[in-house]
Amino acid sequence: ERRLLATTAKVTGAVVAASYVRRGWRILGINARITHTTTALEDWQHQWVLVQSIGNSPTGLSTEGREGNPAPGDSSQLLELIEKQGSKSLAWHSYSALRFLLIKRTMDLLYASVGAAMEMTKSRTTYDDNGEKQPSRFWMPIATAAAASYYNIFGPTKKSAEIVSSSSQDFVKNAWGVVSLPAVKHLSLQASRILKGAAIADRIEIADVPCVVLSCAQCPPLATALKRFRRQQERETSHLCTIMEGTEDAAFHRHSVHVQDYPKHNVILHLTGGGFFAHTLAGDFGYLLDWSRYTNSVVICPEYALLPEHRFPAAFDQTSSIYSAIVSGEAGPLLGFRPDRLIVTGEAAGGNLAAALCVKLCMDKLFEGEAGDNRGSGDTLPTGEMQYEFASRKSSSNARLPDALMLSCPMLNMSLELTPSRVKGTNDPVLPSGLIKTISDSYLPLGTCVEKTDPVASPYYASDDILRLFPPTLICESSGDPLLDDSVDFNTRLKRLGVESDLKAVHNMPHAFWGLASAGFPEAKQCMVECSSWLQMMFCRQHDDFGLVIEVGYEEEDEESG
């Protein structure tokens, strides 16, 4: 009897425990559905507000001109583009979806923490001599760490959405500026040098702009030029510079140097992203060194001027000057070689600069062609001419387009035009809609002489005559990127005009995902493999050589020793 009672008690206990577990699992599933429904409703309401505020506003830009897009102000059709929520429980996700949710959680935590820290340290904000806000260097990191601990427990989604919807220049600079800190870039560069086996990873100045130079392969001419650059820097900063002032002209001479005297080497000019507020080079070094290894090329990364201190066209002017110096051979003494094949790459804001550079070069070619047809100096250029006047424009028949162009999630359209992808990608982990407006208004403030539809500021609006001259182009995009439609339309136009162009979309990746390849995300790694193959194919092609003669200065003793 005792055994029977014990057995009965065990069975009863097991049944009761199983029923409690089943009940708890059902409650967990119901809570998960309620939470997802609440989040979906908030997203839908946010998208509704976006459609109503932009699509129907008197000053809102229309979507007219995009194939297949609804007419301006037709909010109902735009709302139909929002993904419908199914009845199936989302308790389980694919591995790629879980990785995407991890990125979303991380970025929400960053935005919520930085925004809350700015609110907490608002009373401790100081101002510099120019009246610019200077957040407390001591309290800001402490407040951010404290806020991160809090929101990591209680959830950052709601606070992140609140902060991003009313974002400011200071918020974007503080949130993204961490990756631009010199210490972060230095540590990332040194780590990449060790992990990737970089033979050269150094900094130089080309056209008075700081640039990072990377190469996995041994490049003796570049190594020698970098040593010479370092020696000269040491002399300029040493206490002996005052003694050498009188003999400066004797130490430096102007000589006619033939570009053909330098060895040739393939070059990748990479323009990093960061929304014009930061340089994301710290996350780029890994795949840039992979590109250098696969293509046996030298990678040059300009650290162009940033917002909010430098608005358009500062970053573009610097990028254009660096490109001209490399192509013309003016940078030959600094690099120790001349470019063989040159490919321009860019991600996000860097994609804007890369495409704008090609637009400007194509416009120069059109200008030269029309000048050859004896057009009057007072005649206007074809449709799509930029409104920005270059103070030091140097058009030359020797101007050379890059051999190829590769972009990732490029900001081709700086206007606040409403598109289906911008509605569906309202809450992108990296680039939510609130940040798009902040970046656009900061880069091209209202009231300036340059419109947001200027083809140099927004290459999306370049004319067919310009785009027809574009080099072979590859665009990498995320299927959920708010800027996807701009890239799709741009790629479609290029292909229609006979340009060799292609677009690759990656699922479950955020905006500007190239750097995630180094973090081990398989979708980004696969995209990097395809990009490396494409770069190899472009470098294997042949092009016409150039024989340019320029004037450069160098040290006489270095010439003798070299």
Image (cartoon, rainbow, N blue to C red):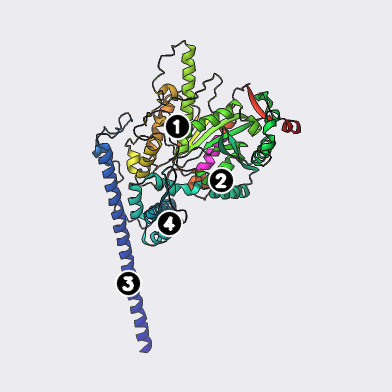
Q: Residue furthest top?
A: 374
Instruction: Tell me if label 1 and label 3 are in contact, CB under 8 Å.
Output: no
Mark 3 secondary-structure assignment: helix
Tag in front: 4 or 2: 4
Could you tell me if residue 359 is visible in this image? yes
Q: Which badge, 4 or 3, comes first in the chain's sequence?
A: 3
Which residue is painted at 48% across and 29% down in the image?
357
The location of residue 454, given as percent across then percent down, is: 39, 28
Which disc, if any, is residue 144?
A: 4
Which residue is painted at 33% across and 64% down in the image?
28
Q: Is residue 222 magenta?
A: no
Q: CA distance from mark 4 to mark 2?
A: 28 Å
Q: Which badge, 3 or 2, comes first in the chain's sequence?
A: 3
Q: Is residue 531 magenta?
A: yes
Location of mark 3 (residue) = 20
Location of mark 1 (residue) = 313
Relative to 36, residue 182 above or below: above
Q: Amino acid at mark 1?
A: Pro
Relative to 457, residue 24 above or below: below
Which residue is painted at 72% across and 30% down in the image?
556
Tag in front: 1 or 3: 1
Location of mark 2 (residue) = 286
Q: CA distance from mark 3 to mark 2?
A: 50 Å
Tag in front: 2 or 1: 1
Q: Mark 1 packing: few (<14 Cα in 10 Å), some, or many (20+)? A: some
Could you tell me if residue 509 is visible in this image? no
Which residue is painted at 34% across and 70% down in the image?
21
Instruction: Tell me if label 4 and label 1 are in contact, CB under 8 Å.
Output: no
Magenta region: which residues? 527-535
The location of residue 218, given as percent across then percent down, is: 68, 39
